Every structure is written in C-alpha cells, then in structure tokens.
Image: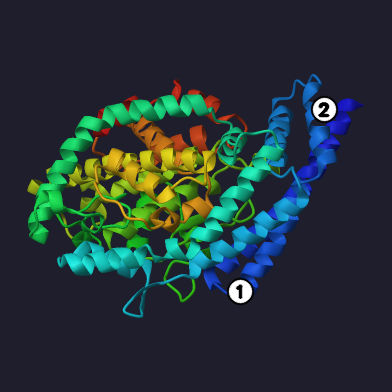
Amino acid sequence: MQEKEVQEFLKEQNEKIKAVYVKAQLAYFTAMISGKQEDYKAYEKIALEYEKFFHNKENFEKIKEFQKQKNEDEIIKRELEILRLSYLGSQGDWELLQELVKKSAEIEKKFNTYRAKINNKEYTDNDIREILRNEIDSEKLKEAWEAGKQIGKVAEKEVLEIIKLRNKLAKQLGFNNYYELKIEIGEQNKKELIKLFKELENSTNAPFKKLKQEIDEVLSKRYKIKPEEMKPWHYHDRFFQEGPEIYKVKLDNFYKTDVIEKAKKYYESIGIDVSDILKRSDLYEKKGKYQHACCMNMNREDDVRIIQNTKNNEHWMEITLHELGHAIHNKNLDFSLPFILRSEAHTFTTEAIALLFGRKSKNAEFIKNYGDEKPAEELFEDIKKMLKLRELIFIRWGLVMFHFEQELYKNPEQNLNKLWWSLVKKFQLIDFSRDEPDWASKIHLVSSPVYYHNYVLGNLLASQLHYHIIKLLKLNKETDYSGKKQVGEFLIKNVFMPSAKYKWDEMIKQALGEPLTAKYFVEEFC
C-alpha cells in the first residue's frame, strides 16, 4: 500500500511540475526576447507560481518520510531525492520568497535591456567587444571598458539586496549562507570543490604567469606602452576571461560568413541534426533583447531553443557551437523517464558538452573543414596556442569568480570593490584597482548565482571526455571529430541518455570508468 502511495504521489508531482515548468520557460523566453516590461511581469507571475508549488511544506515532509522507507526501485529513489532538493530551496518564509522572485525578475530585466553609453550614444555588448578588440588608442579603450562596466553602478544596490535576501532565506533553512545552500542543492561538496580548485590554482600558476608575461609583451607593443602600464581595458574583453589576440593568426578571417550554417553542418557530420533547434531559436540582435546567449529546454521533450546575438566572427562561432552543445544534450535525453529525471545529471555535465564543442572554433581541423578559407600550415601552431591561451585564461578567471562568490555570501557588508580587485590581482595578475562596483556588472551574480564554478568543472570534464573519445576511436589529439558519427553515438549513449537517472559522479564513473579529475585538463593545457 505504501509503495502505491509513493507511485501515485510521484505521478501527480511529475504532471504538476511539467505544467508549471512549461509555462515558466515560455514566459522567460518571451521576456528575454522582447525586453518588454509586461513580458517580464508575466514571467514574474509564473515564477511565483513555480516557487509556490515547491513551497508546499506538507509535500516536503512527505518526501522526506517516503525516503526513510525501504524502496528497491532506483528510479523512485532518485525522483524522491531530486524532489527533496527542489523543495528545499523553496522552503522558508513565503513573503521572503515572493520578494526574492520579484526583485530577481526586476534586476534581470535591468541587465538584459541595459545598453552601455559613450558620449550619450548607446552601444550593445557586441559593440563594446569590437572596440576592445580592435581599438589601439588607450583612452578610447578605457572609455569603452568603463562604459561596459556602467551597469555595475546602476545595479549594485539591487544586487546587494538580493544577495542579502538569499542569505536570509538560507539561514531560515539552517545554512550559514546562500552559497552553502546552493552547493547542497547541487549535490556537491564544498570541501571537495575547494581542494579541486586549489589543485587547479597550483597547476596553472606557473604556465599562466609565463603566458601573462607573453600577453603583456605583445599587447604593450601594440598599444605603445610599457608592459607594466597595461590596464584591464587592454586585454580585449571586459573581464579578461577570453584570450586576446597575440599570435599571427586572425581567427575572425575564417568566420566571415554564416557561423550558424557552419555549426549546423558540423553537428550533422557527427550524426546529430540541429536544424529543428535552430528553427525555433532566436539568433540575432534586437532592441531590448537579452544580450548574451543561452539554451532553453522548453518542455523536456521536443522543444529545445537557443538565444543568441550572432555576428559572423570567431567569438560567435564558439558561442554557437557551445549553445548547440547544450541543445544536443537536451534534445537527446531519455524521454521515457519521468519528467523530473528528464534533465542533465548536473548543470556542469552539460557545460562540459558545450565547452567541448565550443573549443572547436579554435581548432585547425575544424577551420580546414568549415572556415571560409583554409589556414596555412604555418598557422596551425598559433591556432593550437590560441586554444591553450583561451583555456588557461578562463580557468584563472573562474578562480576569481569561485572565490569572490564565496566571500560575497560570507560577508556582503565587506568592501566588495577592494575584494574584487584583490582577487583579480592574485589570479589574473592584473595590478589595478578602483573604488567602483565592477563586480556587480557580471550578470551571472544575478541570473545564475553560485554557478560559475560549474564552468570550471565543465572544462575539466570536457578534457576528460576528449581524452576518452580519442582513445576509444583512436583519433589524433587535435581532432575536431568531423565525420565521426561514433562521437555523437558515444555521447548520446553514455552522457545524454542517462539524463538525471544517476547522481553526476555516478554518471561520470559509468560513462568513463573513472571519477571526475583535473588530470586531463592539466595535461592538455598546462
């Protein structure tokens, strides 16, 4: 009788969660595309409905009681655990939860619709990126960099309010702060994360220091300044999270036409059709639209979409491959599973797929196969160096975000401007500071809290997957996998189809025969 009660409860939960999930995804997609106040309000309303569903204390207690009982069915056990974690984050005071949803929707709208200004003229994020990459006048670079940070000053007060409200919620639920709550909900271990990130810090210290000296030597000549005069606006993007161009090869030259079509042909070559995904997606700039990129699984069945602001250059070639990496993961889940389990094993495991394929934009074989022109052989080594540069720079940037978010939630009252620049100096070796809330210009602190460490974990798993793919198929290390349908088959069977049936560490062990490790990333890029 008890088993039947659990099954009926789970059946009802799956049906109700699916109904509100689909509504919420559609509302969010619509708001991000339009930027309209009424669409964000509609999304806020649905988000509150979603929050209210999981706020149900009676159901939360019922789930915990069901978990205490002996149950041999592994699917049911997994459903109950995922449900428990889903309900956990929505317990606490209802008034507080409502305030959090409302403020989060408002600040997301502000970020998504904000446009930087230089001399009262509006610039998109793409515009700012182009200036930082192509301008050689230091004053104009500084002007563009500061414009790109303006949203931080505009949003600082509201971001801090949300941080404090999140902490208040976490304390109601028995956690020291929101960071620890999110780690718990994500089925991760804080001590293990700290240990892994320390290992990465130590492994990348020497190679990054050497690389940073090379970057400063090359770029300082370009800007006609001394290496010690290099400032944050000299590194080609607002956060020094991507690789500046310091080698002879200019990757944009290979991607001057239709990067969407290039990505489509590439995924077809490994046996995965993305044409249906692209048809439903919103791919180009619009007034008021969300300026970044994301993938959305609209119904956990047959509707996966990406949002982009595509330009024909290497940056958007990488992003298109990245977002479609998320999309092919979502498209190839096991839809025979209950709705609750129709997602990735963990958010970082789908990041791994996105990062694995995003790297191909800096791959000589990929450029030979899909570029507008074939790279000369003497440029192959530079292309390889560019990928290494990009990966090392991103890991060091990830260390900044990993440590900043921990300290932010530990004590949001501290001098966050000073903290930010101290971490930038330590991990990115940029000796600069100013008393402005530059940290608050990073949208992830609002839209994806306690998430950034998952990009780093995704990079580690991407290298681990790559190692096993080339070993399994006996490919060379520099392969882009083109024409290798076995790659698609391997990923679908071992990474996508298991969905959330297993906890992430178990899925990785089953797929690769070993636990997650930093070893392969260090071997590949350090």
Q: Is residue 312 visible?
A: no
Q: Where does label 2 land, which residue?
A: 65
Labels 2, 1: front one: 1
Camera-nearest residue between 17 and 405: 405
Query: Residue shown at 88%/32% (left/top)?
Result: 5
| Horizontal side, residue 77 vs residue 33: left or right | right
Image coords of residue 44 (percent x, y): 67, 63
Q: Vertical placement of 500 versus 306: above or below?
A: above
Image coords of residue 182 (percent x, y): 59, 39
| Horizontal side, residue 291 vs residue 158: left or right | left
Image coords of residue 344 (percent x, y): 56, 40
Q: Where does label 1 land, which residue?
A: 37
Query: Residue shown at 49%/28% (left/top)?
Result: 508
For label 2, the SS is helix
Q: How many other residues sit within 10 Å of disc 2, few (<14), some (14-19) or many (≥20)? A: few
Q: Is residue 480 visible?
A: yes
